[in-house]
Amino acid sequence: MDTSAEERQQSTEQEEQSLERERRERYSRQMLFAPIGENGQRKIEAAHVAVVGMGALGTVIANHLARSGVGRLRLIDRDYVERSNLQRQMLYDEDDVRELRPKVVAAERRLKLINSEIRIEPVVSHVTAANAERLLDGVDLVLDGTDNFGTRLLLNDVCFKHGIPFIYGGSISSNGMTAVFVPGETSCLRCLLGAGDSAGDTCDTTGVISPIVDIVASLQAAEALKLLVGDKAARRQGLLSIDIWRNSTMDMKLPPPSSSCPTCGLKQYPSLHEEGAALPVTLCGRETVQIGGRHGLDLKLLKEKLSRSCGLTSNPYLLRAELPEGERLVIFPDGRVLVQGTEDLARAQSLYDRYIGS
C-alpha cells in the first residue's frame, strides 16, 4: 500500500472513531440504563418507526424518539401549524404559524436540530383506507398521535394485517389513556373499543391541558423503547387510564383476543375496506370542513386562477385563499381542501365546486 493510501485509510479510521465517540457520548446516559445498554441502543438505532398524527401527542413522542436515537422516523400528518397548537404541541413556534408550515415539515426542521444523525421522513397526507398500507409500509412500529377513533381503528387494522406492533394513546381534558397492541400476542384496539365512538368529546370541544399530553405521550415513547430493545417482560399489559386533575389512575387488563373480532379474529380488517375519503367531513370544533382529494391539485395553476378574486398566502406545501364570501380555502397538493369558516357540508361543497372545480 502506498503512503497516500495509508494516509487515507488512517484518516477514515480516525473519522469513524470520532463519530463513534460522539455517538457514545450522545447516548451515554441511555446506554447506562441496564435494560437498554449497548445492544439495546444498536437496536434502537436500527429501527424504523412511524408516528401518525403530529399534534400534541405526536410532537412529544417524536421528540423522545429522536433524542433516543431511533434511526428512521416517519412522521405523518395532514395539517399545518395554527396558533392554537402552540399551547401544547411542543415542536412548533410562532414562525411555523406565520409561514403556514405543515406540521410534519415544521417537526422535521426542529428534530434535525436536535439529532442530525437520524433520518426523518415527513409525509404530508391524510391517512385513508386507500393509502394507509402504503404509508406504513416497511416500519417496525406504529405510534398513535391521532385525535379520532376512525383513524385509530384504521391504523389498528393495518398493523394487525401486517404484524406491526401498535401503541395507542389519547388525551382530552385532564384524562389520558394508553395501551400496547401486538399482533399474535394481544387483543387489538377493536376488541377493546368495538367500532369506536366517532361522536365523542374532542380537544376542540372539551379542551385539554398540556401536562396530560406529555404524560401519555411519554408513556407511549417508553413502551416503544421496550418493544424496540425486545424487553417483553417489561411491557405494559393493560389499558392505563389517568386523570391528573382528579388524581385517579386505573390499569385495566386487556381482554383476550376475540375469535369474532373482525380484525384479530376473523382477519377481515373492515377499516381497510371503507370508502368515502373524498366526501366532505366536518372537523369537530374547528368550524372547518375537509373535502378529500379525488385527484392531485396543481397549486401553481390554482394560485394563478384564484389570484383574480381571492387574497392568497402560499408556500411549497399549501395554498390558502381568503374568499370574497368570508370563508377560507386551504389547499394541499394531494387534493385535500379545508373549507374554513363553516360547518355546513353543502356550503363547503358549493365553495369547493365554485373555486376548485369538480
Image (cartoon, helix red, strand yellow):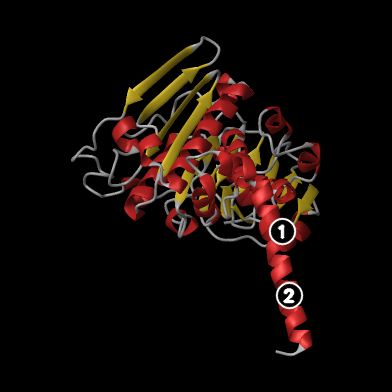
Q: Any mark on residue 302, and which?
A: 1
Relative depth, front residue between 335 and 157: 157
Q: Amino acid at mark 1?
A: Leu
Residue 304 image-quadrant placement: bottom right
Is any atom of residue 335 visible in this view?
yes
Mark 2, other Cα within 10 Å: few <14 / some 14–19 / many ≥20? few
Residue type indicated by callout 2: Gln
User: Closer to the N terminus: mark 2 or mark 1?
Assistant: 2
Q: Which residue matches tag 2? A: 10
* Number of numbered discs: 2
Which element is circle 2 on?
helix
Image quadrant holding the C terminus, namely bottom right
Picture quarter with the N terminus: bottom right
Residue at (74%, 62%) from the top-left corner? 300
Q: Is 238 located above or below residue 338 in the figure?
A: above
Considering only vertical position in the picture, is 35 above or below 6?
above
- Which residue ends up furthest to the top in the rendered image? 246
Q: Residues within 10 Å of mark 1 (few under 14, many from 20)?
A: some
* Residue in the picture at 35% in, 55% down: 162
Q: CA distance from mark 2 to mark 1?
A: 56 Å
Nearest-to-viewer mark from 2 and 1: 2
